[in-house]
Image: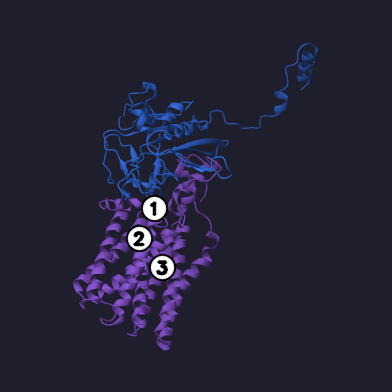
Amino acid sequence: MSTLPGPTPKKLGLVIDLDICVGCHACAVSCKEWNTGGYGAPLSDQDAYGGDPGGAWLNRIHSFEVEPDDGPAQIVHFPKSCLHCEDAPCVTVCPTGASFKRADDGIVLVDEDTCFGCGLCAWACPYGARELDRRAGVMKKCTLCVDRIYNDNIPEEDRVPACVRACPTGARYFGDLADPDSEASRVVQERGGFDLMPEQATKPVNKYLPPRPKDRPLREGPGDLAALAEPEARGFLGWLDRALERLG
Amino acid sequence: MHPAPSMIVFTVLTGLGLGMVALLGLGLGPDYGGTRWLASALALLIGAAGGAASLGHLAHPERAWRGFSQWRSSWLSREAWLFAATLALFALHAALWCLGDLRLRPLGWLVAALALATVYATSKIYHQLRAVPRWSVPPTPALFLALSLAGGWIGVRMCQALAGQGGADGWLALALLAAGGVWIWWQTQAAGARLAAVGTDMGTATGLGRLSRIRLFEPPHLGHNYLLDEMAFRVGRRRAYQLRWLGAGLGLLLPLALVVLSWLLGGWLLVPALLGHVAGVLALRWLFFAEAEHTQALYYGRV
């Protein structure tokens, strides 16, 4: 059904901490690994070992350089996947009913047996969260690892999305963003979590936490870096070094 | 946006065919002789050929029937229903008209309303996409309808002329002028609807713009992907200016000139007029896709 269910009792989603992410791509690799064998058709690659490789991924890490007016530039690694929007435009445009938002937990999914691969949902998504699988001819997107989070056959600590489980730095939170007491909601509250492109009025469930400002901005150049790397002199040379330093 | 040939051929041909259907339904053209056969057959043929082209855009054309299911929310689904209903009822109308010598006016009006509603539904598929500001400008439905009616008008008058039952009149020239006016209206609105102008940029896409200046440091990967192929199309924008005037010239100005000339030299000039119109609208529709920026491209620094 490609009508939206309205407010859902649970809003499962991710919170991504841009302050912590180091851009290792472990979440993207883990996502591809799990989802190529999980829900739906495998995530195919084309010309994987050739000169022009391409393929379907559900999570990709972009890296940006931001430069505040009053400090040095910094790199922000920016993982991006489906935001499981409350007002998901990808769902309502679907002509076949393959694209749907679950009424109980708000996860946006594609029924691959119904999808005919017209690509309109990928056009409707402002974020680039949907990719057509070139081999299966159906739309692929983040499932929030729906086949892990409710899976009683795997250890309890694995019942989170593969990207969250893989992140070595703890930059990804998974939880119910409708519950104000969940860890995910609390970090959003404490750190000023924000929406991507609020002007698109999609009401994303996933939130992003801003990078903290650098606490020790470099006001001046560091001087002679080569000298700092020299080994400390001892004995006679050490006395000479200190004597020369006293001379100024 | 990637200008997929299937989408361009589909929208241009169904636009033309449905324009003819609408005008024939409203009663344009004489009610006797060869015009009936020629105009009805051509409208059905062009419309059906356009409909067939749309299947080329589907990765699973064998599941096309599923596209009828979501008329409550999806403009694409509504378009499918309206298109099928229009062609079916027009075929009935044409059969009664050509074989039964009966031009059922109320049925014709219904067919005309359905045909225009189909073109409107097609335009809404693009118009509804907020992520593509160039398409979501107010005159997009008007542009599709105006080009459809202008093409249909040339088509019906051409059939009349070929059947030796009249030809171009002042109304056709006026229709072309009106379509030109709507096109200029759309063009001025679209020119002001670049992503930057509507307040969406890399800063709002990442939420980092309020902190500082931002630029892409590294894309996620060096290869291509579906999103870049589909949403970050940039080939040919350099030649947009030339192509735009070529499209407007062939699609609207040349037919207008040929319409005027046909009053002196004969109605057969409406054949090159229609061919020129189709070629020009194909060029304009190609630009409609190729020039459209999608918000997704901001994440790849490709706007």
The residue mark sitting in front, 1 or 3, is 1
Q: Amino acid at mark 1?
A: Leu
Chain shaded blue: A
Q: Residue at x 55, y 36 (%)?
A: A75
Residue on which the image places disc 1: B58
Q: Residue at x 72, y 27 (%)?
A: A226
Q: Is residue B106 visible?
A: yes
The vertical placement of B70 against B14, above or below, is above
Sequence-earlier tag: 1 or 3: 1
Chain B is shown in which shade? purple
Residue on which the image places disc 2: B123
Label 3, residues with CA under 10 Å away: few <14, some 14-19, many ≥20: many
Q: CA gap, disc 2 to disc 1?
A: 19 Å
Q: CA gap, disc 1 to disc 3?
A: 29 Å
Q: Numbered disc 2: what chain? A: B
Label 2, residues with CA under 10 Å away: few <14, some 14-19, many ≥20: many
Estimate the x, y position of residue B144 in percent, counting from the top left.
36, 65
In this rendering, would B98 be left or right of A121? left
Q: Amino acid at mark 2?
A: Ser
The residue mark sitting in front, 2 or 3, is 2
Dot 1 falls on a residue whose secondary structure is loop
